[in-house]
Amino acid sequence: GAEREILTWDLFGRAGRELAQAVADDGYEPDVILSIARGGLFVAGSLGYALGVKNLHVMNVEFYEGVGRTLDMPVMLPPVPNAVDFSAKKVLIADDVADTGRTLELVRDFCLDHVADVRCAVVYEKPQSLVKCEYVWKRTDSWINFPWSDQPPVTARAGQVLDA
Ligand code: 5GP
């Protein structure tokens, strides 16, 4: 759609609780929450508190736009979590949005080789996503504005930089 989906911090607070509630209602008790940086960090933190899970890990994934259209693919950036940390564990992967789903697919497939159970929780899932997440707060085909990335990075103001 042409319209935008706006997620405010307020609404994100509710989304996190409701997403966690869906996980709990399903009877899934993850040992580990694996966040996909950076957007997934907020979701993972929220789910971690709401589900009482303290074991949080981070995976850094960058979507590289390759030359032309054939080489674009998400890649895992170091440090890649030690697979031993996940063996025989129930893992919940947390991210902000499954759009093409290729980022989640990469992380889920990495986990599938090593863990007992892996499931995905996202705030938003788009219809074309090739990963069908077990836990979705809202489905949309609009572009989403997230509260953590809807403003440009701050820059130092003149006179505010401390002398070294
Ligand atoms: P993928 O296409 O692999 O599912 O998504 C890759 C990443 O692209 C997401 O984790 C997110 O950072 C970014 N992305 C995809 N769709 C949107 C969107 O609608 N809004 C924003 N802000 N980022 C998006």
Image: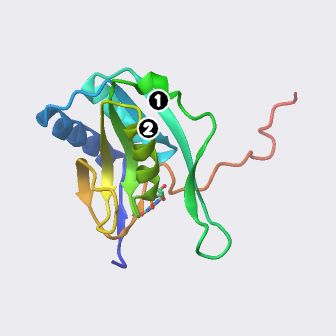
Could you tell me residue 154's position as x and y percent? 65, 48
**Spatial distance from mark 2 to mark 1, Cα to Cα?**
6 Å
Could you tell me residue 35's position as x and y percent? 44, 38
Label 1 element class: strand
Q: Measured along the vertical axis of the image, is residue 101 above or below residue 76?
A: below
Could you tell me residue 124's position as x and y percent? 32, 56
Give the quarter of the figure containing the C terminus.
Answer: top right
What number is the disc on residue 57?
1
The answer to whether the residues at label 2 and label 1 have Cβ atoms under 8 Å apart is yes
Q: Earlier in the sequence, mark 2 or mark 1?
A: 2
What number is the disc on residue 4?
none
Asked where in the image residue 80 lies, by quadrant, the reply is top right
Label 2 element class: strand
Residue occupying the far front of the picture: 113
The residue nearer to you, when weighing 159 against 11, is 11
- Residue sitting at 39 percent across and 50 percent down? 96
The residue nearer to you, when weighing 78 against 161, is 78
Q: Quickly name the residue at label 2.
A: 35
